[in-house]
Amino acid sequence: MSEYQYYEFQAIGRPLTKNELEGVRALSSRARISATHFVNEYHYGNFRGDERRLMERLYDAHLYFANWGSRRLMLRLPTTLLSARSAEPYRWEEALSCWTRKGHALLDFSYAAEDGGEWDFETSFTLASFTSLRTELAAGDLRPLYLAWLSGLTRWELEEDVDEDEYASTIEPPVPAGLGRLTGPQ
């Protein structure tokens, strides 16, 4: 089977400057690039950029997926709208990480299927399907963070070498209201 990777970035808060665009263009000769978007698909080879660094400096949202099961969504919000402290209780290794950089909270939602998972070539996602999560988080809706925490807990629970005492003593983070009525992106 051939390799497939999809990378998409979006600048929401402000468009990239001419110099920033030149720097991004140097990362890929085939990407579709504008002052607010970067999209590229790879069938052989890899992206030459550093997604984390691009998010810290330029972009507000990033989507990555590969046909072997890796999935990643990164969101950047001003810390005035979402503090890293409020996201911290939902952190879970390999499901959600968060950090701050230059007045922004960055959230990294990740999933890697060990078996590659089922790959549906008929279904493709774009970042537009998920950017409303950023708006929800900015409005104080922490359901996306709680769902990431649940995802990490579920994956941990299914592992064969789970320490039962550690699992039983795991403290659940605050449960946000509205879990019975999830949005499409959630």
Image (cartoon, grey):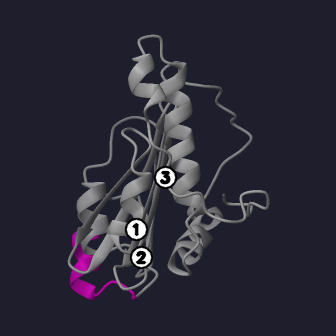
Q: Which of the numbered marks, if any, corresponds to residue 86?
A: 1
The magenta stretch spans which residues?
A: 14-25
Tell me where residue 116 appears, x and y as whole percent: 53, 24
Residue projecting furthest to the right: 181
Mark 3 highlights which residue? 173
Tell me where residue 135 appears, x and y as whole percent: 57, 77
Residue 1 is at least partly visible in this image: no
- CA neighbours of label 3 inside 10 A, class few (<14), some (14 to 19), many (20+): some
Q: Nearer the viewer, mark 2 or mark 3?
A: 3
Mark 2 highlights which residue? 82
Q: In the image shown, does 102 or 21 lie closer to the viewer? A: 102
**Which element type, helix, strand or loop, lies under badge 1?**
helix
Disc 1 marks a residue whose amino acid type is Ser
* Occupied quadrant, residue 45: top left
Q: CA distance from mark 2 to mark 1?
A: 7 Å
Kindly check if marks 2 and 1 are in contact, taking CB atoms under 8 A apart as contact. Answer: yes
